[in-house]
Amino acid sequence: MKKIFFLCLIPFLLSFTSDNDATKSFIKNYFDNSFQFICSDDNSGNVKIHFLYSKFDPETMTFNVVVPDSIPYSDFYKAYSGRIMDVYFKNRNTVGKAEINTILESTNCDIEAVKEKVIEYYSNDSVFNSVFKTALESYYSHSNKKDELNIASADKKIVSIDKLMKIALLQVDILNYDANKGFMYHFVCGVNPYSYAMKNNVNLLLAGFCQDAMKNKTMLDAHSRIMDELREQVKIDYPNEKDDVKGMCKKYQDKLRERLTEDGTLKQCLLEHYEKNKDVEPFILASDKE
């Protein structure tokens, strides 16, 4: 029985290894084609990593990832590069900070050696590898390239619109207030509420979905209109000097998110973006499952 059990496991083990190799191959491709590794005398022996394809869109007032068609698998990276980048920074700013800083140290500016170490680190980081694998499976599930690339079918998580709304609302905030300049705030560059952990391999991609859904003129116009209303309201509510500016900003941030919920534009943008991209997303909207 032990021999039979072992033989039954062989196809599973081979499948897992091949699938993992496909993910690692894509991770290498990602760092080879999407980043520039720079080292100069000014860097004092430290290699700097610059993402190549970020561009400011004046219409929506947001930064977008613009992947050239010449990049291998550009269709996949156009859909997921921004979200993978968010997970990359999540690692850099938390658990991987010390180790990556050490990897980037190179007294002789050996860029290729540093890049190889960076690729090895992220290929073997369990969370980054798992998120990348989830993105690949989600994108290629409906593609004829799935078998060619040896990528497994996606096991998609069911997510409610309420959950997406809560994540999307975190992408807008109010930072400060000045009597002359008004409110200082972020639009579609907020936080990812999920910790860098294996259990969040799908959740870590959801904030990026919400940001992509919000990067359009319809959403910007709705946000701008509500902010204009709040600017007028604060003059009525606080005609004199503002003592607790931080508390006041928190109050109006709550009002902003409340009005965005009531307005309906945000929800509509999320639904429309999902409908347009649901075949390549890592989740199924709850109403689609009913």
Image: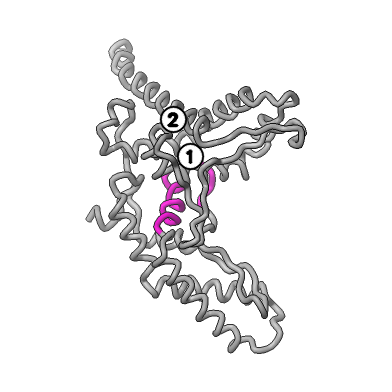
Picture residue at 37% right of the left edge, 69% below the top: 265
- Mark toward the start of the polypeptide (2 vs 1): 2
Residue 194 vertical placement versus 184 (above, below) = above
Report whether 24 appears left or right of 110: left
Picture residue at 58% right of the left edge, 67% below the top: 185
Q: From this viewpoint, is residue 228 visible?
A: yes
Given the image, on which type of amino acid does mark 2 rest?
Answer: Phe
Q: From this viewpoint, is residue 200 visible?
A: no
Q: Position of residue 45 (x, y in %)?
A: 74, 30
Residue 110 vertical placement versus 52 (above, below) = above
Give the alpha-carbon distance from disc 2 to disc 1, as whole Å: 19 Å
Name the residue beneath numbered marker 1.
198
Asked if the magenta segment contains residue 18, the reply would be no
Classed neighbour count for the residue bearing mark 1: other residues with Cα under 10 Å, few (<14), some (14–19), many (≥20): some
Name the residue beneath numbered marker 2.
26
Quarter of the figure with the C terminus: bottom left
Range of magenta residues: 193-213
Q: Position of residue 232 (x, y in %)?
A: 55, 84
Q: Position of residue 176 (x, y in %)?
A: 65, 70
Q: Give the number of marks.
A: 2
Classed neighbour count for the residue bearing mark 2: other residues with Cα under 10 Å, few (<14), some (14–19), many (≥20): many
Q: Position of residue 181 (x, y in %)?
A: 64, 75
Local secondary structure at mark 2: helix
Given the image, on which type of amino acid does mark 1 rest?
Answer: Met
Picture residue at 29% right of the left edge, 37% below the top: 141
Residue 39 vertical placement versus 221 (above, below) = above
Quarter of the figure with the N terminus: top left
Front-most of 104 and 42? 42
SS assignment for the magenta stretch, majority: helix
Local secondary structure at mark 1: helix
* Mark 2 or 1, closer to the camera: 2
